[in-house]
Amino acid sequence: MNDINTQPDTAFNFDALTPDFMWYAIESIGIRAESGLLALNSYENRVYQFIDEEKQRYVVKFYRPQRWTQQQILEEHQFTLELLEQDIPVAPPCIINGSTLHQYQGYYFALFVSVGGRQFEVDNIDQLEGVGRFLGRIHQVGQAKPFIHRPTMNLDEYLYQPRKLLNNSTFIPSHLENSFFSDLDMLIGQLEQHWTEPKNIIRLHGDCHPGNILWRDGPMFVDLDDSRNGPAIQDIWMLLSGERQDKIMQLDTVLEAYSEFCTFDANQLKLIEPLRGLRMVHYMAWLAKRWHDPAFPIAFPWFNDAKYWESQVLAFKEQIAALQEPPLSLTPQW
């Protein structure tokens, strides 16, 4: 997930990030790129892979200006380094000249050693166990103290601000506006009824979907850019897919391994569908907010098509129905 506010995101762009600019930025911290800069799959920030003069493969991340403060980025870096200290497989920022975060002509950036791996297989039970085990260890570290500068998940950020932004946008076709906002407001009303503030708020990965997990000899967790305070289930529910029985089996597998290292509050299971609804609304608004960025129309051409918005009206109805169903529950023997 990504931050949302109600203002159009037009105050800056990434036009300054030419190859020469990035080369000089990297050189400013004593690293000389020998290869070209290969763009990696990232939209919120700009991320590139390169090889330096010592044949070391690096990834450089240029942060989207005005999204996170310096303190918030450093807090994410510190969390990642804490995880690394506990031998948890994460991709940490490099400490160069005593810092993990650097600045060049108005852009914050960080360097990471490039890590390889294949795609995590969500339907592989052994891999699910491995992910569950390390998630337990991540949350064991995460519960030691909260983030001070990074946000805590809340309805304002994930529902109310996105609702206002969508209302002020021009994306929804005029013939769909009434049904779209009527069903959106019904979904928001249902989410308000089903959302309960979690008692146990911890530091999270924040966006722990399968695309942010690589697999080598075990899982490798990457991209903690969306780290924030929230309920533990936020880092678990996106691992679940398929029919209800499939999800229960996957949940049992993950949480049995998870509980070797961290206690899970089963009351949070009732937040799975509310969290799915929050992500649905937030994601639409995030795309709308970032649409001025040339990378977004190229990557998400369907977003500006009437068929997409028609499908979202149906998705609202389906999510409202999902909220009416009993929450997922663990099998008795768990």
Image (tube, rainbow, N blue to C red):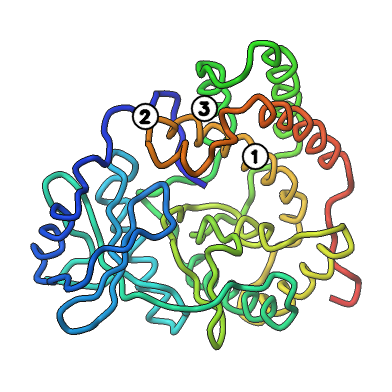
Residue of label 3: 161
Crowd band around label 2 with a 10 angstrom C-alpha radius: few (<14), some (14–19), many (20+): some
Q: Is residue 223 left or right of residue 102?
A: right
Q: CA distance from mark 1 to mark 2?
A: 20 Å
The tag earlier along the polypeptide, 3 or 1, is 3
The location of residue 174, given as percent across then percent down, is 64, 11
The location of residue 119, given as percent across then percent down, is 58, 72
Q: Amino acid at mark 1?
A: Met
Placement of 324 over or under 306, stated as above or below: below
Q: Residue at x 54, y 29 (%)?
A: 162
Residue of label 2: 9
The location of residue 239, given as percent across then percent down, is 68, 63
Closer to us: 213 or 236 = 213
Residue of label 1: 280
Crowd band around label 3 with a 10 angstrom C-alpha radius: few (<14), some (14–19), many (20+): many
The tag earlier along the polypeptide, 3 or 2, is 2
Crowd band around label 1 with a 10 angstrom C-alpha radius: few (<14), some (14–19), many (20+): some
Q: Residue at x 61, y 28 (%)?
A: 305
Q: CA distance from mark 3 to mark 1?
A: 13 Å
The location of residue 69, given as percent across then percent down, is 28, 45
Q: Is residue 144 left or right of residue 107?
A: right
Closer to us: 28 or 139 = 28
In the picture as drawn, the residue positioned furthest to the bottom comes out as: 217
Contact? badges 1 and 2 (CB < 8 Å): no
The tag earlier along the polypeptide, 1 or 2, is 2
